[in-house]
Amino acid sequence: MFNSATTLVERVRLAKSYVDRYNQSPMGFWIGLGKPDPWPDDSNPPLPLESINKVPRLFKFIYVHSCKNVYEDTNGSIVTKDKNFTEVDSSDLYTLTAAKANKVYIEAIVPPLSPEEFSYRILGLCVDVEVAVIPSFLTAGYMLEPNLILSYSVAWVQMGTPTVVSPLSSHVIQIVREF
């Protein structure tokens, strides 16, 4: 999806709408993991297609347990590989705009996977996910096989170099989407 918002207020409104949508239906947000096998040149992955409606070579769905409005802050408590962010705990558009919170922080935890499924090269933010059997309890690290998903839409896809997940420990996926 192309971001066509031109003013800060419009960008904050788009970010806010993502978080509002998550808060209304948290079970509808999942990360799709795809492509466990290598690219032709694993150090130079291809760019994602402009319009993609399914996660290529999908092999796992990971529950998104956190979705927050944030702004970049060198002293922020949300620490990612590249930058730090601070959450704005408000759904008020004026408060979010004053904080310049035009970013959304999304987090999911990949539990330890079996040795044959220890890497992925594609991440897809899947929304409007419809699950065949609704789990009675969802928590961070909850994972589903693709055959248990009836339908989903792709909001965003990233293709990259291999991410290796240890079979002995969990792995945190952090996505910061700027609008």
Image (cartoon, rainbow, N blue to C red):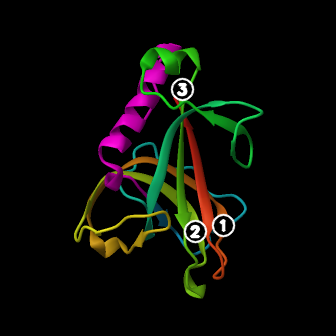
Q: Give the image location of residue 163, x and y in percent.
A: 66, 66
Label 3 crowd (10 A; few <14 / some 14-19 / many >=20) = many
Magenta residues span: 1-30
Q: Nearer the viewer, residue 49 or 66?
A: 66
Q: Amino acid at mark 1?
A: Pro
Looking at the image, is mark 3 or mark 1 earlier in the sequence? 3
Answer whether labels 3 and 2 touch (C-beta < 8 Å).
no
Dot label at residue 162: 1
| Quadrant housing the N terminus | top left
Q: Nearer the viewer, residue 88 or 30?
A: 88
Tell me which corner region of the image, top left, top right, bottom left or bottom right, holds residue 70.
top right
Mark 3: secondary structure: loop
Residue drawn where x is 63% and y is 66% of the image: 171
Give the CA distance from mark 2 to mark 1: 6 Å
User: Looking at the image, can residue 153 be seen?
Assistant: no
Q: Residue furthest right?
A: 74
Q: Nearer the viewer, mark 3 or mark 1?
A: 3
Looking at the image, is mark 2 or mark 1 earlier in the sequence? 2
Mark 1: secondary structure: strand
User: Looking at the image, can residue 126 be seen?
Assistant: yes
Residue drawn where x is 57% and y is 50% of the image: 47
Read off the residue under disc 3: 102
Q: Give the image location of residue 75, x and y in percent.
A: 77, 34
Read off the residue under disc 2: 120
Q: Amino acid at mark 2?
A: Tyr
Q: Give the image location of residue 68, x and y in percent.
A: 50, 39
Tell me which corner region of the image, top left, top right, bottom left or bottom right, holds residue 99.
top right
Give the CA distance from mark 3 to mark 2: 28 Å
Answer whether labels 3 and 1 touch (C-beta < 8 Å).
no
Say whether residue 75 is magenta.
Answer: no
Label 1 crowd (10 A; few <14 / some 14-19 / many >=20) = some
Residue drawn where x is 22% and y is 69% of the image: 132
